Image (cartoon, rainbow, N blue to C red):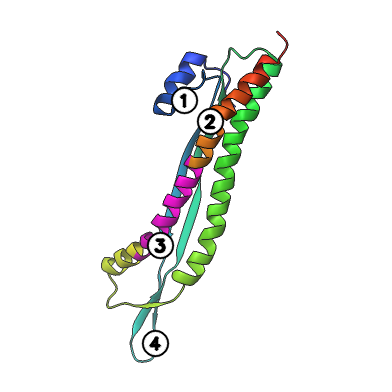
């Protein structure tokens, strides 16, 4: 958690994600990461026919997931309210990525597990495998991204901000 930046710094960092409904007392910054590693295993049967089993490793996670609280939040009550709001954002990111990982496993086991014929040992075969993997993964990753974005918007809805504002007003001076 970073508490070194002021409200104006956080507003600048929020950029296009800045909500018109509130001042920026906290900000959650996520840098999602997806890494796909291909390691096809080539096999040859007794007739000389060659095939490959797609060895695919997909890693999803974050290069960074950082929570910022404005340094002006010197009141513990106000700080805690903003912190809890930002942790909702963190939970949304983590929950969606965990769900995405659970959805990836059956996809990988059913759609990508079987061997496929190959003509030669070449970069073209790996490119074809990469296309096959991406054709399956890209739609799922888009749905994951859309789900995270919808969850973040719900957390930052006008009604949500109104609730945060009401709780902030209830803090002692």
Q: Which residue is mark 2?
A: 156
* Sequence order check, earlier mark of 4 and 1: 1
Q: Secondary structure at mark 2?
A: loop
* Sequence order check, earlier mark of 2 and 4: 4
| Marker disc for residue 136 | 3
Does residue 62 appear anywhere in the picture? no
Which residue is drawn at the image coordinates 56% and 19% (left, top)? 25
Which residue is drawn at the image coordinates 47% and 14% (left, top)? 8
Relative placement, left or right, of 126 versus 65 is: left
Count of number-bearing discs: 4
How far separated are the C-alphas under marks 4 and 3?
Answer: 28 Å
Foreground: disc 2 or disc 4: 2
Tell me the crowding category of disc 3: few under 14, some 14 to 19, or many 20 or more residues within 10 angstroms, Cα based.
Answer: some
Q: Position of residue 112 (x, y in %)?
A: 44, 69
How far separated are the C-alphas under marks 2 and 3?
Answer: 31 Å
Q: Which residue is mark 4?
A: 45
Front position in the image: 13 or 147: 147
Relative placement, left or right, of 110 versus 123 is: right
């Amino acid at each position: 958690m970073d508490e070194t930046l002021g409200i104006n710094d956080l507003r600048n960092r929020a950029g296009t994600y800045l909500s018109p409904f509130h001042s920026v007392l906290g900000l959650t910054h996520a840098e999602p990461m997806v890494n796909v590693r291909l390691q096809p295993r080539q096999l040859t049967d007794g007739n000389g026919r060659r095939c490959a089993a797609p060895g695919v490793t997909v890693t999803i996670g974050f290069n960074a997931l950082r929570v910022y609280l404005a340094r002006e939040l010197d009141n513990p009550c106000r700080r805690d309210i903003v912190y809890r709001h930002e942790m909702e954002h963190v939970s949304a990111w983590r929950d969606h990525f965990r769900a995405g990982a659970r959805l990836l496993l059956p996809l990988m086991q059913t759609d990508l597990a079987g061997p496929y014929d190959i003509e030669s040992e070449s970069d073209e075969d790996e490119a074809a495998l990469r296309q096959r993997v991406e054709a399956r993964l890209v739609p799922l990753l888009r749905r994951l991204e859309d789900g995270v974005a919808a969850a973040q918007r719900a957390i930052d809805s006008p009604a949500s901000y109104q609730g945060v504002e009401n709780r902030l007003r209830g803090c002692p001076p």
